Amino acid sequence: MQNSPRLAAPILFAALALSACTTTRGQTPLPDASNVTLGQRAYADGPIIQPVAVLEDSRCPMNARCVWAGRVRVQMLWIRGNGDKQPFEVTLGESTPLADGSITLESVRPDKMTNVVLKPEDYRFSFRFDGGI
């Protein structure tokens, strides 16, 4: 009877350690939002986001002269904590309200060129989230 408390602590510790291993198995950490592809989920310093489609890429090609610099608009999903997916849209360089702050599409790669047609899988995006508690 007197050894029961001495045995309880190591058994409890072992059970907790094993349960921690089983809950994290199979889960990979999400990448940050600095190099995200279409369809890839990323952690943006708070919300989990996913770019879904390029709605517009009217950027001036790097090897051309343009009157207007153009813009990029991307259809996005905000994956909420309960699993719900909320659609929203971002425009390159503009702040968009999201959650308890705002998100900005900071850059789009690669640069547009007159002699290259970008495919959806070529795009890489960088996002910044401002806000949160």
Image (cartoon, rainbow, N blue to C red):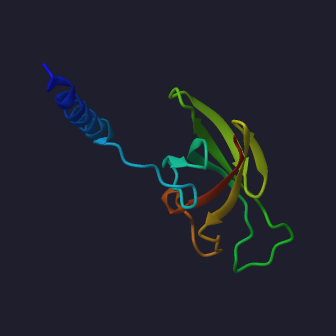
Q: Position of residue 117 (x, y in %)?
A: 57, 66
Q: Position of residue 128 (x, y in %)?
A: 67, 55
The answer to which of 14 and 36 lies nearer the viewer is: 14
- In this rendering, the answer to whether 129 lies above or below 107 is above
- On the picture, is 10 further left or further right than 28? left
Quadrant location, the N terminus: top left
Residue at 57 percent of width and 72 percent of height? 116
Residue at 76 percent of width and 58 percent of height? 93
Looking at the image, which residue sits at the far bottom?
A: 63
Quadrant location, the C terminus: top right
Say which quarter of the image contains residue 79.
top right
Q: Position of residue 99 (x, y in %)?
A: 69, 36
Looking at the image, which residue sits at the far right?
A: 67
Residue at 21 percent of width and 35 percent of height? 10
Q: Position of residue 38 (x, y in %)?
A: 52, 51
Residue at 73 percent of width and 65 percent of height? 59
- In this rendering, the answer to whether 37 lies above or below 97 is below
The answer to which of 110 and 61 lies nearer the viewer is: 110
